[in-house]
Image: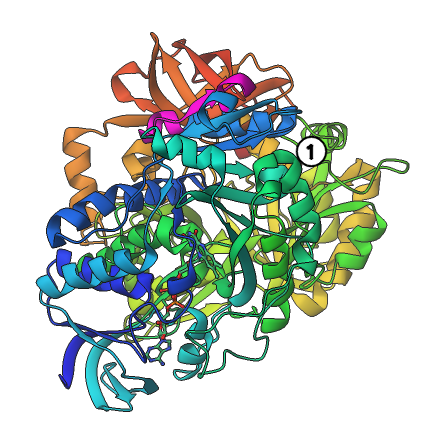
Amino acid sequence: MKTTTRVAVIGGGVVGCSVLYHLTKLGWSDVMLLERSELTSGSTWHAAGGFHTLNGDTNMAALQGYTIKLYKELEEITGMSCGLHHVGGVTLAETQERFDMLKAERAKHRFMGLETEIVSPEEIRKIAPVTNIDGIVGGLYDPLDGHLDPSGTTHAYAKAARMGGATIETHCKVVETNQRHDGTWDVVTDKGTIHAEHVVNAGGLWAREVGAMAGIYFPLHPMEHQYIVTDEVPEIAGIIDAGGEHPHVMDPAGESYLRQEGRGLCIGFYEQPCKPWAVDGTPWNFGHELLPDDFDKIEDSIAFAYNRFPALERAGVKSVIHGPFTFAPDGNPLVGPVPGMRNYWSACAVMAGFSQGGGVGLMLAQWMVEGECERDTFAMDTARFGDWITPGYTRPKVIENYQKRFSIAYPNEELPAARPFRTTPMYDIFDGMGAVWGAQYGLEVPNYFASEGEPRYETPSFRRSNAFEATAREVKAVRENVGINEVHNFGKYLIKGEGARAWLDRIMAGRVPQPGRLSLTPMLSPKGRLIGDFTISCLSEEEFQLTASYGSQAYHMRWFLQNIDEGVSVENISDTRNGFQIAGPKAREVLQACTRQDISDMRFMDVRRMTVGMADCVVQRVSYTGDLGYEIYCDLPSQRSLWDNLWSVGQTHGMKPFGMRAMMSLRLDKFFGSWLSEFSPDYTAAETGLDRFISFRKDIDFVGRAAAEAERTTGAARQLCAFEVTAKDADVTAYEPIWHAGAVVGFCTSGGYSHHAQKSIALGLIPRDLAQDGLEVEIEILGKMRAARLITTPLFDADGARMRG
Ligand SMILES: Cc1cc2nc3c(=O)[nH]c(=O)nc-3n(C[C@H](O)[C@H](O)[C@H](O)COP(=O)(O)OP(=O)(O)OC[C@H]3O[C@@H](n4cnc5c(N)ncnc54)[C@H](O)[C@@H]3O)c2cc1C
């Protein structure tokens, strides 16, 4: 056995083998896979082998598309068969709401190059004749859907990897992973120790146990899952004898997926009475056995399926496959460098290995070999969960995710499991004021405040929800008087030390401000992609506060620590420093009444330490609402006293609390982008207009400089623009296609309703040469073409007089 390797991949399921193959494909041949038994000995061997592109997250859907197209390549390289059946698949909609969702998905597929099609019930009857179409409104057909042979495919990945130089060691159980001082790893196995530069955890069902060997908790949990294979079904046998194949049918109402298997059918369920498996850890002696059949928990699902697919009831059961596989709390994989670790990578929690395994392998290999991925991977990044996550949180979330696998995913939906979990000192006060809560990165945040008599629950919808009136009230309070909300939804970092300024100058593309001032800056990856959108506050020459997205804390801390300099300390103070933002024309009067310091000369983008009421605070004159506003930060123990003070003074100025829904409406008035919508690693600073904050004048080779300069020379090919949309009751949310002259020319990044201007607004990317004020386009919202016009004048305070005055 080899005793040194550049990469040790632990786990020979479909995911580990895909990672291994992609590493060799990108040029790393000194790589090794360690499998405790035979390849496929975890979830992989008993998978149903189905694959599809549909995924609520657009980047995940694109990676699923990549995975499916890869199988042909694998067959060509290896000469092995993956047992591919590209039979196509149709997802049924039994309600208009679900049909809306499918139409929205179809619209997104237009610019992703996926050839899906909306189909009528009659067409469904023709393409999938075992389906009873009673009550079906329509469906989405995807010609790429299909199934394969799980074992053959895994072995094809393995052969392709071997052909690229990789080694695979089976019957080799990893028992310890010990890190050396230089960051490399001793991977201890029952056959000896391997010295590896990098470790990849692709342990699947045992990923928790493999992670624990390095002291890492991976937030994933196995769930039991069952599918049934029938004896011959005459309708299917007839199709096969005529030289055809029956497509897959996903029936979300019945929480089932169905496909042809041999001359019969195979149907699996995501049942509501689902069961987590191996709560306290996966036994090492598990592997090639199945779980006992459990018809009780799928009884209702089977009854429903008999109605939808009557042929099933007449068919005998040939076999039942009941096995476990793992999920993360949101159902997406956990991929990438593990925050806080050196040279330790995750390829875990892949719940649909045959839809996602190729994309996961490609992204991880790009990350390891090239330093970054070609697209935004946040939806599957291990860093989307922080160190606050626990098994107690993961389990109920995983159960919820399994139960909602086939539910409609609404853009405004807040999922209830494992909540409330993390709260700020304001929770009970805001709750008493009618807060309707959302959750960000595990933390409760008010989305809006319901008045007496209004429901304390926002109806999930693709259209304007019942939060509309409350949001309008809050926007009005901000624009006419003064609004208050917490600054808990900012990630906050304290940067200290004699090297602090130099370090910030190197990792941030923008200008680092002088003491007492703020600046806005993009943070770029080496390839010039946006990896952060920060406000820097210079508190003193050796002390800076950074603020950015709350949900990206682990993502940003990982980058900071990977790129830290001597003489600099970075502390994540997101949960220890909190406070409020006050915004609106009366904000200055409120703040002045709460402090003895004269703030009349405090300019836009100034930062000062001041005592507000009794609390020592850092006060910044800036507001994401685009209005006159202040962010007032204090320590957590002072927060309630600060609130009492601001709130009691605010009453004489018409102060009202406002939530995230109002905030997202207010920012649209100024066309302000938001992190992971307009600003993400999918885009560059020049495309999104953030290049105006890049300091090309500073004499520093900041990260991403060469790429940003190159783009400055050529100009970005596309440009972020704002549109006024003639929407009816549904606004843009994200990824709706933008049509011009009969063709799709771009897509929306986000949008919503500007309550201040009473207009529906979309932000989106289109080719730069089209981006002219007044350009007439159409935006496809829920399958309807809506006329839209490119606008360049902000809807509020266009000259900035209020914000800066
Ligand atoms: C009933 C059922 C049906 C399914 N149907 C589908 C489907 O139709 N389509 C689809 O895409 N997905 C399906 N899945 C899910 C699919 O099986 C998983 O997504 C996939 O198998 C995950 O692969 P993996 O490589 O991550 O993990 P695993 O397959 O669990 O592989 C992990 C490997 O790591 C090895 N290992 C663990 N610890 C160590 C160690 N310490 N040392 C060495 N080796 C170690 C294990 O032996 C194992 O071989 C289904 C799952 C089930 C249970």
Task: Indicate the quadrant containing the C terminus: top left, top right, bottom left or bottom right.
Answer: top right
Q: Position of residue 557 (x, y in %)?
A: 41, 64
Q: Residue at x 81, y 52 (%)?
A: 431
Image: 56 above or below 336: above
Query: What range of the chain is rendered magenta?
Result: 109-124
Near-viewer residue (387 or 351): 351
Near-viewer residue (606 or 81): 81
Q: Position of residue 686 (x, y in %)?
A: 28, 34
Left or right of 23: which side holds 744?
right
Where does ligand 1 appear, by image quarter? bottom left
Instruction: Check if residue 466 falls in the magenta segment.
Output: no
Left or right of 664: which side holds 159?
left
Near-viewer residue (486 or 583): 486
Q: Residue at x 31, y 50 (%)?
A: 359
Task: Indicate the quadrant containing the N terminus: top left, top right, bottom left or bottom right.
Answer: bottom left
Q: Residue at x 48, y 39 (%)?
A: 674
Whether residue 262 is visible here, answered yes or no, is: yes
**Tag 1 residue:** 478
Left or right of 345: which side holds 133?
right
Whether residue 802 is visible here, answered yes or no, is: no
Q: Position of residue 237 (x, y in %)?
A: 42, 36
